[in-house]
Image: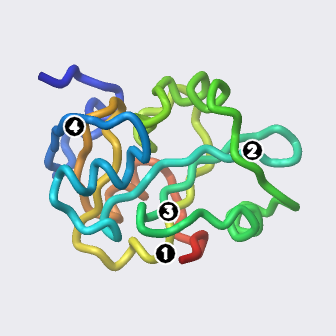
Amino acid sequence: MARRTRALEVLAGTAHEVLTYSPGRSDFGRDSAAKLGLDAGEVAKTLVIAGPDGSLAVCCVPVSRQLSLKRAAKALGWKRAEMAEPTRAQRSTGYIVGGISPLGTRTRMSTLIDASLAALDTLTVSAGQRGLSVRLAPGALAELTGAQFADISSA
C-alpha cells in the first residue's frame, strides 16, 4: 500500500484519483503510462530545471514529448536553463527521481505546465513516490501549484 505523501496531503478537498502501479527502474514517466494503461500525452513527467542565477523551477510536460529548456527559460524570464542536478532536485522537492511531484514540494518553486495539457479533462502526475500517481484536472494542478501554462515542449 502506498504511503501518504505531501503531494496527496495537498490534494485534500480537490477532486482526484490515486493510481498505483509497480514501478520500473528507468523511463519512469513512460513506464507509469504503460502500466496504468494511459495515453502518454495525458501523463506528465515532472522535471526540475535551474536558471542562470541558480534558482529552480518545476516543469510538467507530457511523457510523449520533450522539455524545451529554451522555451521554459523564456517562459520564466530567464536567459537560459539547464536540468537541475538530480541530488539538488531531490533536496529541493523532497522526492526521489522517478517520484518527483509538482505537488507538495519541500521548497516553493515557479511551476510551468505544458500548454498541450491545458485542454485535457484530466492529467496524471506523480504523487510523490515511484509507483504512485494522481489524476486530476489541469486547472486544479495549476491552482494548487501556482503554475502557469506555457508552450514548453517539443516532439
- Pointer 3 with pointer 2, Cβ within 8 A: no
Q: Residue at x 17, y 52 (%)?
A: 36
Q: Which mark is residue 113?
A: 3
**SS for dot 1:** helix
Q: Of the residues shown, which amino acid type is indicated by label 3?
A: Ile
Say which quadrant the N terminus sits in.
Answer: top left
Hey, which quadrant is residue 38 in on the image?
bottom left
Callout 1 amino acid: Ala
Q: In the depicted view, which residue is nearer to us: 46 or 74?
A: 46
Would you say the residues marked 1 and 4 are in contact, meaning their CB atoms lie under 8 Å apart? no
Mark 1 nearby-residue class (10 Å; few <14, some 14–19, many ≥20): some
**Which corner quadrant holds the C terminus?**
bottom right
Q: CA distance from mark 2 to mark 1?
A: 20 Å
**Dot 4, how many residues are within 10 Å of its Cα: few (below 14), some (14-19), or many (20+)?**
few
> Which residue is disc 2 drawn over?
50
Vertical arrangement, residue 64 with respect to residue 144, above or below: below
Residue linked to disc 4: 12
Q: Amino acid at mark 4?
A: Ala
Q: Is 17 rendered above or below residue 79?
A: above
Kindly indicate whether the residue at mark 3 contacts the one at mark 4 (C-beta within 8 angstroms): no
**Residue 25, image x, y percentages:** 38, 34
Residue at 38 percent across and 51 percent down: it is 29
Residue at image coords 50%, 62%: 113
Of mark 4 and mark 3, the one earlier in the sequence is 4
Tell me which label, 1 or 4, sits earlier in the chain: 4
Find residue 97 and report its horizontal and vertical position in percent. Answer: 49, 33
